[in-house]
């Protein structure tokens, strides 16, 4: 055990508070709490934070960067701990080879070239990798992903690739400066998600909408998110972590 009892208690309490908020948001939206997966994102925090979060009952963990994801996967595996690992940040094509067969879901497939690389590597390994297409629904230049106008063609192209299975969409909303500002982006993403279901090879697998982070996950749930990616609200302020 690498973590302290104090850290375990802190993360369990934080996770429980987030789960309660998710339950409240689901109840307000007439949804079942089980329809939303909570992903704890331990970006920049040491591996013992991921270990403690899993020990405290958080079964889905996410990372933004391959260079953080792989060592955490390896360390927890050594300890016999097997969370569902999500890659939620930008993935470079030259890093794909390091994560094939290690992820539960890749959220951030933002180009056809990246999808092709994942397809090639997965097929060569005899695997099928679950992915989401990242949509830049807000239109911000700082955001990666397919524009709303590009998504249908992207879905059709990826549907023909072996070794990958599209599960849905991921998006990031602009940082809110006032409550509710993110909600229109989530609503538009949900609308596109529903429209695209008819274009996928297996509509029964088109079941995942990854939207919402610590500052806006309640609005995301109200608009149909099935995965919320929570870092700060569980693990704390990243700026306090020593490099």
Image (cartoon, rainbow, N blue to C red):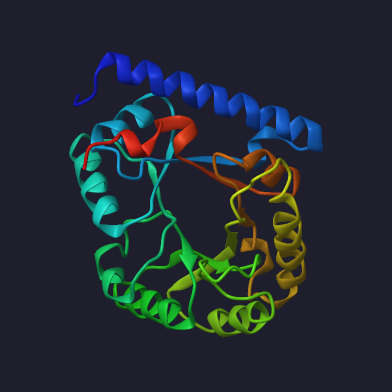
Total number of numbered discs in the rendering: 0
Q: Nearer the viewer, residue 144 or 206?
A: 144
Residue 10, quarter of the rendered image? top left
- The x, y position of residue 21, in whole percent, is 64, 28
Q: Position of residue 169 (x, y in %)?
A: 60, 63
Q: Is residue 96 left or right of residue 79?
A: right
Give the image quarter of residue 75: top left
Question: On the rendered structure, is 93 left or right of 167?
Answer: left
What residue lies at 55% left-to-right and 44% top-to-bottom?
213
- Say which quadrant the C terminus sits in: top left
Q: Position of residue 43 (x, y in %)?
A: 35, 45
Q: Quadrant of the N terminus?
A: top left
Q: Nearer the viewer, residue 217 or 115?
A: 217
Q: Is residue 73 above or below residue 50?
A: below
10 displayed left or right of 147: left
Which residue extends farthest front? 177
Up-down relation of residue 118 to residue 24 (above or below) = below
Q: Give the answer, above or below, for where 189 lies relative to 223.
A: below
Residue 192 position in % (x across, y down): 73, 68
* Residue at left offset 52%, top offset 66%: 143
Residue at the spot 61% in from the left edge and 56% down from the top edge: 174
Closer to the camera, 91 or 61? Answer: 91
Please give the name of the residue rendered at 32% of the width and 20% of the height, measured from the top-left corner: 7
């Amino acid at each position: 055990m690498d973590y302290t009892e104090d850290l375990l208690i802190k993360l369990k309490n934080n996770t429980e508070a987030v789960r309660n908020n998710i339950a409240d948001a689901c109840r307000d939206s007439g949804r079942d709490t089980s329809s939303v997966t909570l992903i704890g994102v331990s970006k920049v925090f040491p591996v013992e934070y991921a270990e403690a979060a899993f020990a405290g009952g958080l079964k889905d963990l996410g990372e933004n960067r391959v260079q953080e994801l792989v060592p955490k996967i390896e360390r927890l595996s050594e300890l016999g701990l097997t969370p569902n690992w999500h890659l939620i940040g930008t993935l470079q094509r030259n890093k794909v080879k390091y994560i094939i067969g290690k992820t539960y879901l890749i959220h951030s497939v933002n180009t056809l070239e990246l999808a092709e690389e994942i397809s090639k590597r997965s097929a060569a390994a005899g695997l099928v990798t679950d992915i989401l297409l990242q949509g830049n629904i807000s239109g911000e230049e700082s955001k990666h992903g397919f524009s709303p106008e590009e998504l249908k063609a992207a879905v059709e192209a990826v549907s023909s690739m072996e070794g990958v299975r599209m599960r849905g969409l991921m998006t990031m909303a602009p940082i809110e400066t006032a409550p509710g500002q993110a909600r229109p982006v989530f609503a538009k993403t949900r609308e596109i998600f529903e429209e695209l279901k008819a274009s996928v090879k297996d509509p029964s697998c088109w079941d995942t909408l990854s939207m919402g982070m610590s500052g806006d996950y309640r609005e995301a749930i109200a608009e149909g998110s099935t995965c919320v990616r929570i870092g700060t609200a569980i693990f704390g302020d990243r700026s306090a972590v020593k490099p």
